[in-house]
Amino acid sequence: MTILITAVSGHYGRLVVDALLERGANPADLVATARDTSKIADLAERGIRTAVLDYDRPETIAAALDGVDRVLLVSGSEPGARLAGHRNVIDAAVAAGVELLAYTSISKADTAVDFPLVADHLATEQAIAASGLPAVILRNDWYTENYTADVSRAAESGVVASSTGDGRVASATRADYADAAAVVLLGDGHAGQVYELGGDTAWSYDELAAAASELLGREVTRVRLTTAEHVAALESAGLDAGTAAFVAGLDDAIRRGSLEFTDGTLSRLIGRPTTSLADGLRAAVAVAAA
């Protein structure tokens, strides 16, 4: 069984390859792809086939999928501009007759319709369903690593500021989510499933400030902002009005509960507890400082 992973030059895709190997995959059965294969040349040295795959160049997708049985489509990185590329991969997977397509979506993609990041993911899920491909949807909640910059700023300011209100986030680490993808790609019985994946514990921003305090060895205070105050602060920091509204919109979605869902599906899939907020932040800050 040959498994192809897209976007392996990114943090998550690389971790999926690592997880597949740790779970016993034969390197010769893996195809690691990226737009620039020089960024994953070390994997070729480990016996893994590497190939160019650019979502916006269909000819590269068709070539990479030759002889492939299962595919992990890692969502593109540009919100609002990734659906066409996703469709290209889906179409190529249909043409290649792959037996399973896994896609990294976002938490509650079908119901959190006012969440700024949902539209591309929901449209991709719908395109996969319409294609008739045997598929599994991995709806990943937030990455704990997303908060590395917040901790770094808190080291200087002593503040974690947000307009999330009492909203909670069921984050897990990239490695936790990558491990779940490996389980699905190597196992059977996952086709047709939609997995809502999140950390075992949904935490508040007060808890984020407390975790930052412990990690940094200094007091970190949580500052609550209104959405208007948040937008104004972001614009004062140099963001344009559209980007500031987008970022504040993410906090607003968290405030309304878009990322708080957790039912233990992720830990059940990977067979262990998910990484705690404190441990995840500690590891992320250490990597950023290296």
Image (spheres, rainbow, N blue to C red):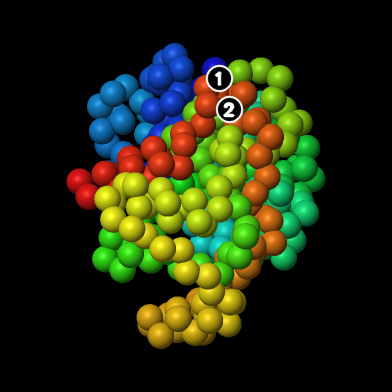
Q: Where is residue 98 drawn, in percent x and y?
A: 64, 29
Q: Name the spot of residue 270 as percent of width and height, x first.
A: 55, 24
Residue 228 shows in this picture: yes
Say above or below: 134 vs 1. Answer: below
Residue 218: which numbered mark, if any? none
Drawn side of residue 43 relative to residue 240, left or right:
left
Taking the image as shown, residue 275 lies to the left or right of residue 165, namely: left
Residue at 53 percent across and 45 percent down: it is 171
Q: Tell whether label 2 touches label 1 (CB within 8 Å).
A: yes
> Does any portion of residue 178 appear in the rendered image?
no
Going by the numbered disc 1, the residue's amino acid type is: Gly
The residue tagged 1 is: 271
Q: Which mark is residue 267?
A: 2
Q: Nearer the viewer, residue 205 or 187?
A: 205
- Label 2's element? helix
Q: Secondary structure at mark 1?
A: loop
The amino acid on which the numbered mark 2 sits, given as a three-letter code, is: Ser
Residue at point 26%, 33% (across, down) = 42
**Residue at screen point 72% across, 36% down:** 194
In this view of the protein, which residue sits in the foreground, 262 or 5? 262
User: In the current view of this chain or complex, which residue is farthest to the left?
Assistant: 290
Instruction: Answer above or below: position of 48 versus 63.
Output: above
The answer to whether 50 appears left or right of 167 in the picture is left
Image location of residue 77, percent across then percent down = 49, 57
Residue 287 at x, y = what percent? 27, 44
Q: What residue lies at 60% left-to-right and 70% top-to-bottom?
A: 249
Neighbor class of circle 1 (other Cα within 10 Å; few <14, some 14-19, many 20+) is few
